[in-house]
Amino acid sequence: MIDALVPLALLGSGLAAGILLSTTLGIIPLMETFPADRYVYSHRYLWARYDPFMPICFGLTVVADVVLAVTAPDRVAQFLFAAAAVTLCCVMGISITKQVPINRWVKSIDPEALPEDFERLDPRSRWRNWNLMRTTLSCAGFALTIAAASVL
């Protein structure tokens, strides 16, 4: 079982960290240059593609890390897998409590009839800041998973 879970944990945490890093380095800076209506269109387009994948990716990775934290034959590896699971759970918590409400609000907006106070409500800076926190935690989780796998 360990032989199957270690590659799954590495793949999942690597994909998650890579996607969030790509979002931080490329997508967010691009979206910040868009006028509000184009931002809303683009955000809705992207969210529909990331939403089904990312929760599954994080969920499977956390499960793999937790099982490895309990079953790995080395105490240091167990600790590192547990720490990776905790960091990824923090990412999921930020996603659920901070990002998803913003995503739902943007999805509810008609890009052709933006709220009059959209400039005041524009969520891009909040979304960017929370995503940077998720990216940092996700990369840390990936590094912890690599360290755990290297101990085995």
Image (tube, helix red, strand yellow):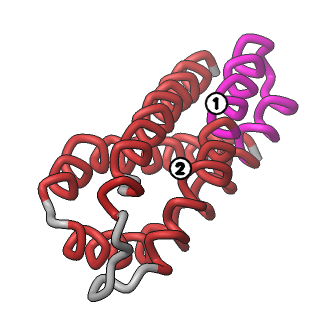
User: Would you call the spot at circle 1 few (<14 residues within 10 Å), some (14-19), or many (20 or more)?
Assistant: many
Could you tell me the amino acid type at mark 2? Gly
- Write the residue at 71% across / 38% down: 65
User: Would you call the spot at circle 2 few (<14 residues within 10 Å), some (14-19), or many (20 or more)?
Assistant: many
How many numbered discs? 2
Q: Is residue 115 left or right of residue 28?
A: right
Magenta stretch: give its range.
Answer: 64-89
Which residue is more in the foreground, 144 or 72?
A: 144
- For label 2, the residue is 12
Q: Is residue 13 left or right of residue 72?
A: left
Residue 26 can be seen in this image: yes
Question: For the stretch drawn in magenta, what is the main secondary structure?
Answer: helix
Measured from the top left, where is residue 88 in percent x and y? 63, 38
Measured from the top left, where is residue 150 in percent x and y? 54, 20
- Write the residue at 19% across / 74% down: 38
Q: Is residue 10 above or below residue 107?
A: above
Which residue is more in the foreground, 3 or 70?
A: 70
Q: Which mark is residue 129?
A: none
Q: Is residue 91 above or below residue 31?
A: above
Magenta highlight on residue 131: no
The answer to which quarter of the image holds residue 81 is top right
Which residue is more in the foreground, 55 or 147?
A: 55
- For label 1, the residue is 87
Q: Is residue 40 above or below residue 146?
A: below
